[in-house]
Every structure is written in structure tokens, then in C-alpha cells.
Amino acid sequence: MSAQNLVTQPQEQGNAPQLPADMASRLTDPAVWADEAGLHELLATIRAQYPLAIADVPGFRPFWVVSKYQDIMEISRQNSLFHSGDLSAVLMPEEEYQKLAGGGEDAEKVHRSIVYMDPPEHGRYRMLTQAWFQPGSVRKREEEIRAIAKKTVERMRAAGGTCDFVSDIAVHYPLEVIMNILGIPDEHYSRVLRLTQEVFSVADEELGREGDDTFSLGSDNVFRDFNAFLRPFHEDRKVNPRDDVLSIIANAQIDGQPVPEIEALSYYVTVATAGHDTTSSTSATALWALSRSPELFRELKEDPSRIPALIDEALRWTTPVRHFMRSATEDYELRGQLIRKGDWLMLCYPSGNRDEEIFENPQQFQPDRSPNKHVAFGYGAHVCLGQHLAKLEIRILLEELLANLDAIEPAGPPKYTKAIFVGGLKSLPIRYQTA
Ligand code: HEM
């Protein structure tokens, strides 16, 4: 991935509060993110004692840890003051970032996603697909998505009463939905699965690409391979447009010109990856909750109108996108601290979603929580483009599962991915009876 703007030097931090070294280094350790209980204990301590402080970890540019819900919102809503593209939008060691940013304007660009764009460019690219992702528009796909969900439930029936809900079920369903909306034929399923996992699960030895030593996202080679895979579809849709997201982007114009190839390919990669592990780990969390409480299972089976509240609580609980980074374009005062122009900030969504000042009993999973204004989809101009699709597809899957299962229970301990950017459950063994 190539950074888009010039590298600036880290600022002198003066009297800004510092996160103790051990806390800061734990926060940047992917293994800590695979230990749910330990992670949330750490985040609760940070919120209570260092709600807005700088993490100075060897190898990393110092960054502010924004742990409070209100601060995450305040920064996210001002995307001219807090940019996504001036420094890395995801946490990575400085050396890795310098390699990406250091190539200058002539460097080969392998990924240029809307996630890393800022105004006014960001708005122009986002507008291309925004209407397609609105609730009314994604609902038109409900029947097709339900057919995929039914097929998924049949797979569970065929498995005969036990499975790993993540690796056997939850990982596959959202990818099949995404391939459907993008317009990529089923025969390419295994290839797309591998590529999306290599993008986000880079620190996980079971899921990342062998030999990749990058920190939070797959290497340039992964993005190059993804682009090479998608290029023929991009070319095809320019001449044979269809009713899919690929066709919209392949034939769109920015300022009267066709979308440049790398931006178009990156858009497809972003949709494919952003909508995959995030949705699967949220579905898995909802199922984890159902498997632990026969009463909840029975109640929701009788009253599926409670499913949307369960999904919101699963989103709050799991918060699959663990952070995005921003950098300040001006000096800014936040929580009595001076954020200096050029400072790098981590929006720590899982912490915001357990903020005691916003959520009552935040460390309890409450399937009917209301209100539940979680920030799992982010906020402001970059707020998740696919949020309505994600909620729709998870609701349909849960409706089909509840209608076709009579009972469900845990069959082993759950496991979480080692990932500091996007993660959640990686294994959820269950036993179940089909109806
Ligand atoms: C449970 C599922 C999902 C979660 C938790 C999630 C979360 C997020 C978050 C936190 C952001 C960044 C928001 C910000 O910076 O304020 C984001 C952006 C984005 N998401 Fe999602 N997402 C999910 C599903 C999806 C799906 C299904 C798609 C598409 C098929 C999608 C496409 C995108 C795109 C394209 C962006 C970039 C938007 C921009 O920069 O303007 N996401 N998502």
C-alpha cells in the first residue's frame, strides 16, 4: 500500500500525558487482542487513568490513544481537521510506514482506497456507491441473500450436529454475499477467501500469508495479487455492465474522467475485505451469545423481532474494527490536552464501546440493550459504507438459523484472532440439533 502524502516528523510531545510503557506496548501486541478479558481490563484501566494519553512504543511513531466514546465521536465528525490519509490510517511500525511512504509520487501504487482519502476527494469517491448501499437499495437483495443463508443452514444440517461455527459457517456466508453484490462468480470463492484473510489476519500464523512480516495489513504482494485477480472483472464490466457494484465503479466518472484503474481495483478490494471478517465475527458473537443461553435462544426463536437488538449488542461487544488512525491538520484542544498539528491518533473503538459514561454495565452482554449507540461502524464522513448491508445479512442468517435449529450449546472454548486492526472470534465449536 502506498501512502498518499508526504511524511512529517513526529512532534515533540512536551507535557502531554504518557501512557505507562507496559500498557502502551501491550496495546500494540496483537496477542493481547486475542485475549478478550485481558484486553478489556487493559482498556478499562486506560479509560479510567489515562483517558487521552500518548503511547510511545519503541519502533512506532508516538500516537494518542483516544479511549473515550465522546472523544472518538468528536474526532470522527471533523474529517477536515483529522485526516485519514496524511499518515497511516492503520497502526504500523514507523519503519514499515516509511517504506510505504518513502517511494514518493513515482512509486508503484498498489492500493488507494477511500478509507485513506480526505476531503474533497473522499466525498467524490464515496458518492459513487453511497446510494447503492442505502437501506432501501440493499433490501432489494434480500431474496438473494436469504437464498445464501438457507444454503448456509443446509451446510450445518449436513455437518450433523457439531461444527466450528466460525471456520465452517460464519467465515463463508458474508464472503458469498459480497461476491454476489460485487458480481464475482462462485467458482473463484477459495481464491477470494484466501486473499481477504491475507489482508487482515497478517499477524495470525494460521490465517496470514506465509512469509509476510507486515504488522496490521497484508504486504504489497497480497494487494498486487488481489489487483491481478480483479483486473479481468474490471475490464469485463466496462464493456458488459451488469447489476452489481463492480459495474457501478468500473463505469463511474470522477471529475468527468473514468475512475483510474488503481482506485477502482482498491474500491473492490476494500468492499471485499471490509465486509468479510467484520460481518463474520459479528455473526459469530451473536451465535456465541445464543449458545450460552438456552433461554435467550428460545425467546428469540419465538420472537425474531428481537434479533436486531441482539445484532447491535454483538457489534458493541465484539467491535471487529479495533481502530482507525487519524492525524491532526491543525492544533486542537481535546479533553484539556493540546493535540498538535501533525499528531497521530488511534480511535480505539472497542474502548469507546465499553465506556462506562455511555453504556450502563458495559462489561455485560445485554441482548436487549437500549439505547445502544455503539461506535462499531465508526462515525462521520467515513462511517461504514456497508453498515446496512451488514445488519441485513446478519439478521437474515440469524432468522434462518433460529427457524431451523432446535437447540445449540458450546462444544469447546472460543478462540480469538491475533489482530490489532480487524478481528474477533476465530473459532467457536458448537453442538446443535436441527429442526
Ligand atoms: C459488522 C460488519 C462491519 C463493521 C463492524 C464495519 C466497521 C467499519 C468501520 C469502523 C469503518 C470505518 C469508519 C470510520 O472511519 O469512521 C468502516 C468503513 C467502511 N466499511 Fe465497514 N464494517 C462492516 C461491514 C461492512 C460491509 C458489509 C461493507 C461492504 C460490503 C463495508 C464497507 C466499508 C467501506 C467501503 C468503508 C470505508 C468507508 C469510507 O472510508 O468512507 N463494511 N467499516
Image (cartoon, rainbow, N blue to C red):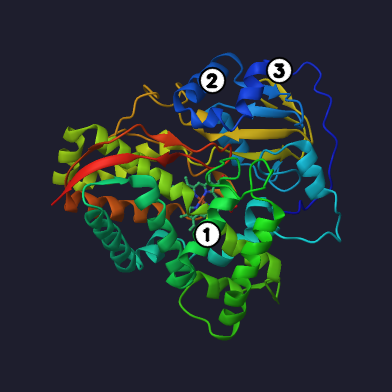
Quickly name the residue at label 3. 18
Three-letter residue code for mark 3: Gln
Q: Residues within 10 Å of mark 2 (few under 14, many from 20)?
A: some
Which of these two is toward me, 251 or 150?
150
Counting residues from the start of the chain, the first of labels 2 and 1 encountered is 2
Check the image and name the residue furthest to the bottom: 239
The amino acid at mark 2 is Leu
Q: Secondary structure at mark 2?
A: helix
Circle 3 — which element?
loop
The image shows residue 310 at horizontal and vertical percentages of 30, 40
Badge 1 element:
helix
Residue at the spot 45% in from the left edge and 72% down from the top edge:
187
Q: Residue at x 85, y 58 (%)?
A: 105
> For mark 2, what is the residue?
42
- Which of discs 3 and 2 lies nearer the camera? The answer is 2
> Residue 384: image x %, image y %?
51, 50
Is there CB contact under 8 Å for labels 2 and 1?
Answer: no
